[in-house]
Image (tube, grey):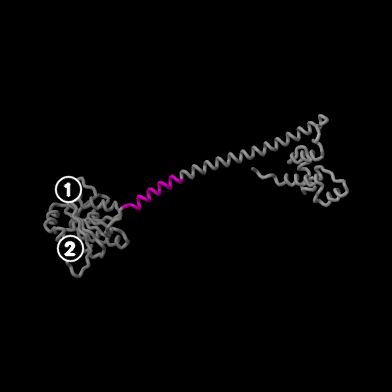
């Protein structure tokens, strides 16, 4: 239920006081004491402390009050005796009905707007609730993921003969966020790959330096070289980071077109992984932390 208009309420309360002969206005009090108190739009407005134009004119803002004043004057206590009086009464009634209709229309408009707003908010809240439920489900999946038992090594060394799949294995680590280096990258240029046996020492030095810089920057690094002997691996071990040695054994065709004589010499000096690791870990002056994985690749094996 809506609250009454405070101005209209002031007028009605003022009218009631005048009807009871108990005005609060000093001037009207004197008139009442003298028996000259009159009830009209002027006296009601004076008692209410409001402008009389709000209730005195035919199309006034508060037609109900105007009609109540007329009733208090006796204007409608009896049936109208003239057409003019009847028309005035009907106009007053019409003005009251129009005012009530405008009030109802305003209330209806407010109700429609409030309902639409509530529907929009309900749809939005429903969508947000669905999003949150989905998020909770995803978070529960993350919470229940199995934890890794071991910490990833900072340095992974992939060794193997030419054409045994070292680069392929390194690409798998690169997809996991590792920086990938190998000596063969030294021979790559815009013109393609051009192997030069006389520059092998430079290539290995370059690869070792790139690895050192990346590890110093906090990166994880995978290096794919032949690493045929202990001497090839030792400089990387001396960098002082946790490392893992993986042997690539997927025999295939080398993509770098290494000369046959180089391949032959590499096979001649090749040290098996277990023997190589034993030499690395038996040095008394070094603290070596290593893990060895001999991974045999099948043709359709995916790392």
Mark 2 neighbour density, 10 Å: few (under 14) some (14–19) many (20 or more): few
What span is in magenta?
128-145
Q: Position of residue 65 (x, y in %)?
A: 75, 41
- The residue under the point 79% across, 38% down is 71
Q: Position of residue 196 (x, y in %)?
A: 19, 55
Please say whether residue 240 is visible from this viewpoint: yes
- The residue under the point 22% across, 67% down is 287
Q: Position of residue 123 (x, y in %)?
A: 49, 42
Q: Quadrant of residue 147?
A: bottom left
Assign the magenta stretch its main secondary structure: helix
Residue carrying label 2: 231
Q: Nearer the viewer, residue 198 or 298?
A: 298
Q: Nearer the viewer, residue 218 or 183?
A: 218
- The Cα–Cα distance between marks 1 and 2, rounded to whole angstroms, is 26 Å
Residue carrying label 1: 253
Q: Position of residue 270 (x, y in %)?
A: 13, 58
- The residue under the point 30% across, 63% down is 216
């Amino acid at each position: 239920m809506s609250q009454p208009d405070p101005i209209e309420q002031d007028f009605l309360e003022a009218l009631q006081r005048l009807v009871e002969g108990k005005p609060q206005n000093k001037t009207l009090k004197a008139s009442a004491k003298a028996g000259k108190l009159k009830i009209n739009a002027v006296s009601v407005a004076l008692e209410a402390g409001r402008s009389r134009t709000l209730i005195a004119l035919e199309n006034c803002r508060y037609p109900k009050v105007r009609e109540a004043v007329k009733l208090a004057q006796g204007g409608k206590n009896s049936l109208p005796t003239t057409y003019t009086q009847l028309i005035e009464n009907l106009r007053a009634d019409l003005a009251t009905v129009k005012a009530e209709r405008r009030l109802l229309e305003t209330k209806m408009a407010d109700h429609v707007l409030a309902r639409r707003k509530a529907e929009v908010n309900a749809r939005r809240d429903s969508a947000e609730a669905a999003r949150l439920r989905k998020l909770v489900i995803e978070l529960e999946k993350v919470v229940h993921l199995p934890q890794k038992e071991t910490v990833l090594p900072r340095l992974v060394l992939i060794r193997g003969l030419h054409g045994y799949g070292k680069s392929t294995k390194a690409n798998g680590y690169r997809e996991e966020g590792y920086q990938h280096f190998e000596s063969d990258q030294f021979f790559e240029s815009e013109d393609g790959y051009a192997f030069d046996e006389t520059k092998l020492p430079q290539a290995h030095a370059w690869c070792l330096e790139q690895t050192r810089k990346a590890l110093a920057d906090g990166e994880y690094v995978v290096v794919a070289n032949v690493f045929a002997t202990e001497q090839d691996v030792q400089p990387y071990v001396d960098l002082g980071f946790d490392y893992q040695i993986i042997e690539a054994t997927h025999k295939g065709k080398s993509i770098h077109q290494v000369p046959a004589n180089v391949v032959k010499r590499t096979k001649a000096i090749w040290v098996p992984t277990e023997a190589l690791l034993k030499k690395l870990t038996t040095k008394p002056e070094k603290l070596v932390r290593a893990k060895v994985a001999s991974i045999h690749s099948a043709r359709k094996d995916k790392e």
